[in-house]
Amino acid sequence: MEAIQKKDIRALTREELRSFFLERGDKAYRGDQVFEWLWKKGAHSFEDMTNLSKSVRSMLMEQYVINHIEVDHMQRSKDGTIKNAVRLHDGLIVESVLIPTSKRTTACVSSQVGCSLDCKFCATARLKRMRNLNPDEIYDQVVAIDRQSRLYHNRPLSNIVFMGMGEPLMNYRNVLKAIDKITGDEGLGMSPKRITVSTSGVPKIIRKMADEEVRFKLAVSLHSAIDEVRTSIMPFNATFTLSDLREALEYWYQKTKSRITYEYVVWEGVNDRQKDVDALVEFCRFAPSKVNLIEYNPIDDGDFRQADDIAIDMYVDALEAAGITVTVRRSRGKDIDAACGQLANKS
Ligand code: SAH
């Protein structure tokens, strides 16, 4: 007999679950019960669904599976950062990170296995893109980190950043569905203002997000405001050029009135000249923006070296003089390879 490919029941919406039961001549509210088990109570097996009859449970088991992630391996850094290696139902691994500070705990989640893009300084880029994560695989990472936050830091998760593995805008539909669940009453009920989607900059999707009037925040990994330089470190910039990006971001701001954050690393001999600084200041002018100068986390013996403090100060002074908010970020979780750009399934 040919094995039946069972479907993941978590791909069904509440409405679809309700109609499934109705079509079988059962009550629609059974669909609500299953939905609650899957999303409120986090059931991992049909056996757990004790308010359904045995026959309903085995009928479900014959037709469906419940795919869920498994935290395969957890590492805790000296600074409290936790890195999870998360096993997906097909055995692939992604990573997600919990970053505690005095005021918040932030989850840094992955959106793809590997990455579609090819940034020269990023460890994840070396993995290539293997597949997109499903909405529930993204959602589950958040739930797992929320649990760890309560367990190790006695408070719920406060913020989420899509800065783990992958380019979220290359898996936009699923990221959006996951965010709907995270912010919805039937999921975690979190405010979208506490969620930041970080992108290398896919102009078409940024426009789409603006049209859809999404309410989460946008961060752009800029690293250079000069095309030639940016293309040399982020080769896809040859296709998605800075002027296209800028137009899309201008549109984003017009529609959402939401400030844009730029992530920026300063490297020695790459973007540490006065003209690099001037170009960034100029780029920031068209919409209210904020610059996070992030520390470079070396990924190998490689070509990239963090610039010295003199170069960083040059950026800070120029941005402040132009009235642009700037912060200098120290890395967290470096001892366990959990910092930005270090996620590459090494553990
Ligand atoms: N693809 C998305 C999200 C993942 S990268 C994006 O590009 O925004 C998350 C952040 O880490 C980005 O700002 C990225 O540029 C930065 N990053 C990548 N490699 C890094 C490294 N080795 N050191 C410091 N930051 C790095």
Image: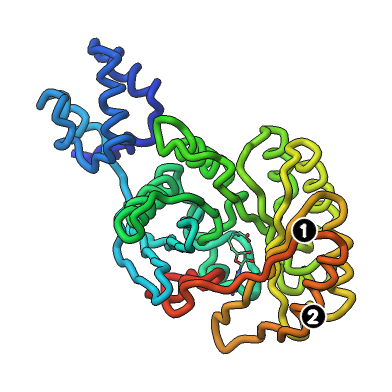
Q: What amino acid is found at the position of numbered circle 2 in the picture? A: Asp
Q: Position of residue 287 (x, y in %)?
A: 82, 49
Q: Considering only vertical position in the picture, is 51 above or below 148?
A: above
Residue at the front extreme of this rendering: 102
Reading the chain from its start, which is encountered first: label 2 or label 1?
Answer: 1
Q: CA distance from mark 2 to mark 1?
A: 24 Å
The image quadrant of residue 27 is top left
- Residue 239 numbered tag: 1
Q: Residue at x 39, y 77 (%)?
A: 78
- Between 300 and 114, the residue placed more toward the observer is 300
Q: Nearer the viewer, residue 292 or 87?
A: 292
Against 326, residue 267 (above or below) is: below
- Residue ID at (48%, 69%): 343
- Is the CB of mark 2 within 8 Å of ligand 1? no
Q: Nearer the viewer, mark 2 or mark 1?
A: 2
**Which residue is at 82% across, 73% downward?**
317
Residue 90 image offset from top left, x and y in percent:
34, 54
Q: Mark 2 highlights which residue? A: 272
Work out whether residue 52 can be spotted. Answer: yes
Tell me the quarter of the picture where residue 310 sits: bottom right
Where ligand 1 lies, by image quadrant? bottom right
Please say whether residue 58 is visible from this viewpoint: no
Reply above or below: 261 against 311. above
